[in-house]
Structure formats: C-alpha cells, structure tokens
Image: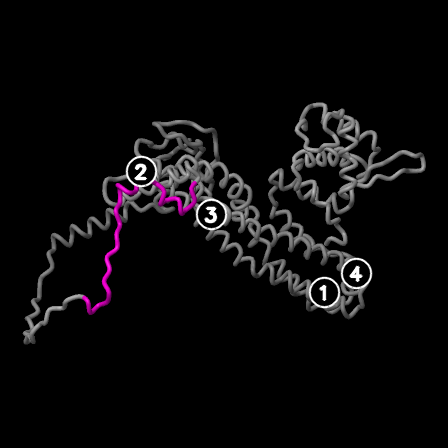
C-alpha cells in the first residue's frame, strides 16, 4: 500500500490540528469537485482558505511557524503542508500559472471519509437492480458486463456485512446507557433511524433479495453452460486484463460461480442480521424494564443495590475493581469465609446399624382445587407475555374503524401501558403486522416523555 500512498499521508489527520486539516481538505475538495478536473489555480485556493481563516474557525492552530501570522500566510502554509504530506501536488503550466491537483488516491480517500462523515447508507436495491438488469441484458460486451456484475455483488455483500456489524456495535454499546430515557432514545431515535428505517426495513420489503435472486442465479448458471458465451467473454477479459486466454477463461468461470455462491449464501447473512436485530431490541427493552420496574422483594432490592453501585462507580469513574473502595458497602453487606483443615478435622458421630423398613406407597388423589388454582395462575402469567400477535390485536382493537392514530392516543396510565407502547413501536417494523409506524415529535404524556409516532393500518 505504501508504495502508492505516502507513509506520511495520514499524519495531518492524526495531528493536534486534525480538525483544521480536515476542514481545509473538505473545503478544497468541494471547490475542485465543481471543476472539469481536480485541479485549480493556486491563487484561487489561497483566497478561499484565507477567507476560512479570517472567519476565526482555526484561531487555535498549533504550529509555531504560523503563530501571529496573517490569514493569507496561514492559507499558504496549509497548501505547503498538504503538498508535503502528499495530499496535493502543485505544478506550473506553460503560462507560469501554478495549479493545484489532488493526488488520485487522495480523491478516493476523501470521498470515502465524506460518506462516513455524512452517515451515507448503502442503497441495497440499487446494487440488486443493477445486477438484475445486467444479467438480463443482451450486449456485445459480455466481459465488461460480467466484471460490473462482480463489482456490484461485492459491494452488496460488503454492505450487508457492514449492516450486520452495525447491529452488533449497537448491542455492544447498549450497556453504557444508564437510564430508561437514554435507552429508549438510542433505540427509537438512533438505532431505528440509522439501522431499521434506513436499511433493515427496506431490506425486508422493497430491497428484498428474494424477488430477484432466482432469475439472477438461473441466468448465470445458463451462461456458464454456454460455450459461445464463455469464449466471447474470455476473449474480452483477456484483452481488458492483459492475460492469456486460458487464464481469462478460468477467471470467467470463477467470477460466475463466485456471484452464484454469494447469492445462494445471502440467506445466512440475512438470518444473522434478523437474529441480531431481534436480540438488540429485546436487550434494549429488557434493560429499560429493569430500570422501570421496581419491587420490595429480594429481586427488587438486589436491583436497587446494583443500580446504586453502578451510579456510584460511574459518577467517580471507577473501574470494576473500584467496588471495593465504596465505603457504604462495609455496613450494607458483610461477607466472610469459614474453612477447616481437612475433612478429618470435623467430628462425625458414629451411627449404629439400622434395619431398613420400607413404607407403603400411598396412592394420593390430587387436590383438584389446588391444581385448578395453579393452572389459572400459570395461564394468567402466560397472558401477560407480549408477542407480535397480541400487540397486533391490541392495536387493531383500539383503532377499530380508524385508519390512523397517534401513539399518544393509546392508554398511558401505568408502566405496563408504557411497555405496550414500546412493543407497538418495535413490532411496527415487521412486514407481517397489520399496521405500520412513522416517527413524529417528542412529547410528554402523564409523566412519560417519548417521541410520538403515527400508527397507520396497512392496505390489504
């Protein structure tokens, strides 16, 4: 890599002035991006950077050579530093005018960093539809088409793996949220917006791979059996990649089978994404319920103790070993150990031999009333367990003839009502539900603050 990219290329983005460097790089890229090439006169860029420094965005720049200098001097200094770090190159044309160009690899890296900064999401349907269209097309350039299919398939798989990793990251970070408000905020406003609404939901509906996969796989398998297609495609790829014809033919078969295998194995990736999405939502709700629901029994008291310890450790930035430095634990819990030298040090009384007298086994008749009472108690417990079917019925029973309502119209008098509202929002993303949801503005109802959402019946 460092035969192409300079080993000092990343220094500006790791320096104390990294924010200033990045803002200047972004500004220069924005200016050059509107030109016919990534080259522009040096004086034009100096004026733009001078204006940037005059606005006072970078008064804290840490570099001795520009302390006390004018904004124009700082602008020239910035261009010299970017040239030194191999981000740009400055050349002089025949008219003795200096022109600034971004390095070709710098352009690719800047575009990638800008996409990360903007939180740009992959449109899976774009890749799938392009692959689908290319596979069905009749063209005189089968080699070029096959390479394009291969490239789009690779970007599709990479995007799905990134989505999978994104959900895992949210699961791993969930433990750093300390209150029900923070947990619900990251679940509904961050996770739902960035993962579910932008990618996961579309992946199960409009961008569903299953609609296009059968024909894509069938047509590629048919092409792999066509001698004329293999010969023509191999000849074109041999010319494009400048390799022998025999090697090009091997690559054609390799590309086709790689694409087919990728589409056949998509179900494994999608299943894991679905599993992690369910796992994340369940973990978030369970953690919120842990903080919301309290009781006076042993479980509730232990929860209060653990919550207090967690709050104390976070307020004082303790590590896990810091629990032993919390003073009130000495009076709260007293744990001690009891030990002995070995098992022979304990006195074991001598027991005489006793004769075994078996007892008759009585055929007891079950207490019907007690049995019915336990069955009733078990059924009541099962009735309280929420699932998609119950939530679906709950919503439809409340809406009746209405086509659309707001979540704030649902009952919200108890913690149980609030838990119902959470599940209505979560299950509203599933395609087999009779309703769908759309996020609205944050409101306060009966002491509960949440982001209101619209519940709309799906058209059948």
Q: Earlier in the sequence, mark 3 or mark 4?
A: 3
- Identify which residue is drawn at 80% across, 68% down: 244
Q: Which mark is residue 236?
A: none
Distance of mark 1 from mark 3, alpha carbons? Answer: 41 Å
Left or right: 34 as drawn, with respect to 125? right
Task: Say if 239 sits above or below 188 in the image.
Answer: below
Measure the alpha-carbon separation of dots 2 and 1: 60 Å
Q: Does 324 lie within the magenta span?
A: yes
In the foreground, 352 or 186? 352
CA gap, disc 3 to disc 4? 44 Å
Residue sitting at 47 percent across and 51 percent down?
276
**Which mark's residue is nearer the viewer, 3 or 4?**
3
- Residue 435, horizontal then vertical, whole percent: 43, 40
The residue range painted magenta reads 318-345
Magenta stretch containing residue 453, yes or no? no
Task: Look at the image and tell me in which quarter the N terminus lies.
Answer: bottom right
Is residue 282 visible from the viewing direction of this image? no
| Rendered image: mark on residue 241 | 4
**Mark closer to the observer (3, 2):** 3
Q: How many marks?
A: 4
Relative placement, left or right, of 162 versus 392 is right
**Marked residue nearer the N-terminal end (4 or 1):** 4
Q: Is residue 353 above or below residue 115?
A: below
Q: Position of residue 158 (x, y in %)?
A: 61, 53
Label ID, residue 416: 2
Determine whether the residue tagged by mark 1 lies in a helix, strand or loop: helix
Report which residue position mark 1 lands on: 252
Q: Residue at x 47, y 40 (%)?
A: 459
Left or right: residue 301 versus residue 139 is left
Task: Measuring from the top left, give residue 84's x and y in whole percent.
Answer: 78, 41
Nearer to us of marks 1 and 3 is: 3
Q: Marks 4/1: CA distance?
A: 12 Å
């Amino acid at each position: 890599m460092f035969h192409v990219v300079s080993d000092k290329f990343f220094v500006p983005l790791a320096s104390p002035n990294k924010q200033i460097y990045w803002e200047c790089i972004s500004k220069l890229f924005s200016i050059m991006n509107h030109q016919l090439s990534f080259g522009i006169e040096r004086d034009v860029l100096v004026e733009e950077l001078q204006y940037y420094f005059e606005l006072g965005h970078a008064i804290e720049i840490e570099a001795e050579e520009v302390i006390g200098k004018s904004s124009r001097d700082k602008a020239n200094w910035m261009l010299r530093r970017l040239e030194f770090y191999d981000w740009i190159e400055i050349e002089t044309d025949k008219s003795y005018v200096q022109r600034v160009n971004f390095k070709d690899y710098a352009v690719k890296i800047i575009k990638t960093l800008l996409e990360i900064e903007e939180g740009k999401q992959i449109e899976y349907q774009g890749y799938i539809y392009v692959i689908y269209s290319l596979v069905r097309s009749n063209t005189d350039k089968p080699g070029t088409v096959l390479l394009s299919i291969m490239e789009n398939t690779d970007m599709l798989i990479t995007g799905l793996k990134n989505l999978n990793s994104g959900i895992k990251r949210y699961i791993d970070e969930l433990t750093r949220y300390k209150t029900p408000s923070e947990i619900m905020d990251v679940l509904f406003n961050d996770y739902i917006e960035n993962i579910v609404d932008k990618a996961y939901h579309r992946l199960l509906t409009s961008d569903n791979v299953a609609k296009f996969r059968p024909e894509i796989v069938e047509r590629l398998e048919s092409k792999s059996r066509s001698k004329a297609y293999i010969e023509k495609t191999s000849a074109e790829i041999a010319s494009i990649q400048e390799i022998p014809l025999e090697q090009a033919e091997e690559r054609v078969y390799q590309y086709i089978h790689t694409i087919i295998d990728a589409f056949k194995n998509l179900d494994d990736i999608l299943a894991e994404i679905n599993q992690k999405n369910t796992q994340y939502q369940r973990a978030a709700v369970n953690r919120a319920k842990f903080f919301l629901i309290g009781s006076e029994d042993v479980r509730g008291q232990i929860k209060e103790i653990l919550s207090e310890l967690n709050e104390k450790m976070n307020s004082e930035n303790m590590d896990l070993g810091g629990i032993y430095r919390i003073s009130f634990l000495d009076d709260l819990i007293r744990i001690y150990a009891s030990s002995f030298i070995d098992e022979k040090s304990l006195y074991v009384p001598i027991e005489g031999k006793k004769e075994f007298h078996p007892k008759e086994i009585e055929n007891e008749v079950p207490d019907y009333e007690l049995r019915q009472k336990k069955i009733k108690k078990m059924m009541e417990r099962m009735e309280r367990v929420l699932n998609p079917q119950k939530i679906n019925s709950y919503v439809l029973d409340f809406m009746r003839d209405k086509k659309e309502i707001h979540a704030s119209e649902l009952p919200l008098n108890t913690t149980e009502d609030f838990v119902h509202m959470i599940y209505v929002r979560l299950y509203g993303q599933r395609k087999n539900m009779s309703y769908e949801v759309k996020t609205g503005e944050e409101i306060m109802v009966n002491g509960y603050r949440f982001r209101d959402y619209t519940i709309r019946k799906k058209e059948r």
